[in-house]
Image (tube, rainbow, N blue to C red):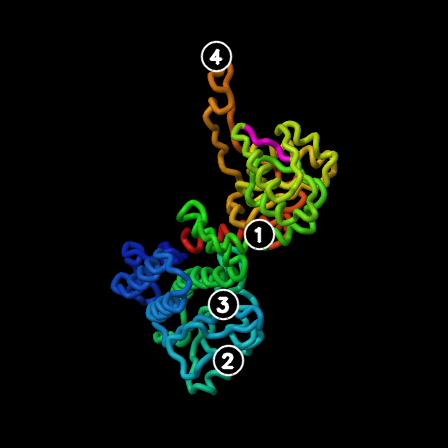
Amino acid sequence: ARTGDGVKVSLPNRFNHKEADMNYSGIDLHSNNSVVTVIDETDRVVAEKRLPNDLTKILTIITEGACKALHCERASVFQYDAKREQLYTRVVTKLEIAEIRKGLNLGITGYVARNRQMANIPDPAQDARWDSTVDKKTGFVTRSILATPVISPHDGALLGVLEFLNNIGGPFDRLDEQLAEAFTQHVAAALDRARLVEELSGSTRRDGARIVQAARKGRTREAGARHDASARLNAHAESLLHGTVVTLSYSSTVAAALVHCRERVHRVVVGEGRPGFEGRKMAERLTAQGIDVTLVTDAGAASSIARADSVAVGADTITATGDVVNKAGTYPLALAAKDQKKPLYVLADTLKISPHRKPPQLEVMPPGELWPGAPDGVTPDNRYFDVTPGRLATAYVTEDGVVDRRWIAEKARTFRRARKLLGI
């Protein structure tokens, strides 16, 4: 924005003392240190990334500061209740009644919310959109209104309306509008964080908590939560795993599901899982539960698919696009399943879903594990994992159900927002 003299004013992000060294609409911003202090305080609060349970405190700081900066009598944050399609007062600097709640079809705030555009009303009594119900209930006299829509910066959803009443110096001017826009950005950030926590209810909230745990400790150690997730995943696998199942190496998730379905699964073909031969551990665990097991080389596992009913593999990581990072040999197994028109099920709890679209870099392990004392000129390329494109997966079996790639993408999107908004 620019003043009448063409001097640039940078308001949406931050006032600084150099930028404030000018006059605008008769206001000496250089001497008006309260505006600078208020915006600095608001920026500091937001920069601290306080958790959403401090929402009321954050909104109160922003609202009171904004009211002071705009020299108005009252300021309110109306939060949007999407279920009822209503606006209600979340924070008010002063109010004679317990709460204001109104539909989007009423008043200036309703107009601002519906149209998602600012409204600067110098004389509400002369405006056809004006709803005087609250004034009549409270005895307050509204002489001027400035209201801005609060929109999520992440998905464009309506979060509410920030409203200012009765500028002390007269009608609200262009500088007030720009200040309101600056404070609205901070209200949007606070409400968006609160909305995220509400969305992380049920299984999504459990996932969010586990993501926090994983980010801080590298992997979750909440045995009780994991046991519950495993039990639900096994239940979802019941309708899919039967007859002969081909798998590769060792996955505790796959092993638990196969044991759970042992009344329906009659034989399991296990790829040995070179170079560590983890497939032997899988074979031992399954046979101990009365399941018939055939151990084959990793290369030979693909040939067994023609006589099998399905392929079940685990996952070290599932990317946001549905690609599966798993034991090396999974990719050719998936290709063979596609060729044989047999379903490939990826069994993994949602903790394995990465917020990132690209898989992690695959580490090259010690070459001596593959060929100790390899002759000169031979370079053993020992990689424990490969990446299987998500398009080859028939379905993903998680504790939340049997899902597809679109569900994985949405879950990853939620995790990305959780990490960003909660500062993880």
Number of other residues with Cα within 10 Å of mark 4, as a class: few under 14, some 14 to 19, many 20 or more? few
Q: Amino acid at mark 4?
A: Asp
**Helix, strand or loop at mark 1:** helix
> Does residue 356 appear in this view?
yes
* Mark number, residue 87: none
Which residue does the numbered mark 2 point to in the structure image?
Answer: 126
Position of residue 58 measured from the top left corner of the image (x, y, whole percent): 37, 65
Q: Is residue 302 found inside the magenta-colored segment of the image?
A: no
> Does residue 181 appear in this view?
no
163 left or right of 306? left
* Relative vertical location of residue 217 with respect to residue 224 in this rendering, above or below: above
Q: Amino acid at mark 2?
A: Gln
**Helix, strand or loop at mark 4:** loop
Camera-near label (3 vs 4) is 4
Position of residue 293 measured from the top left corner of the image (x, y, whole percent): 65, 37
Which residue does the numbered mark 3 point to in the structure image?
Answer: 160
Position of residue 244 measured from the top left corner of the image (x, y, whole percent): 70, 40
Q: Amino acid at mark 1?
A: Glu
Number of other residues with Cα within 10 Å of mark 2, as a class: few under 14, some 14 to 19, many 20 or more? few
* Relative vertical location of residue 37 with respect to residue 103 in this rendering, above or below: above
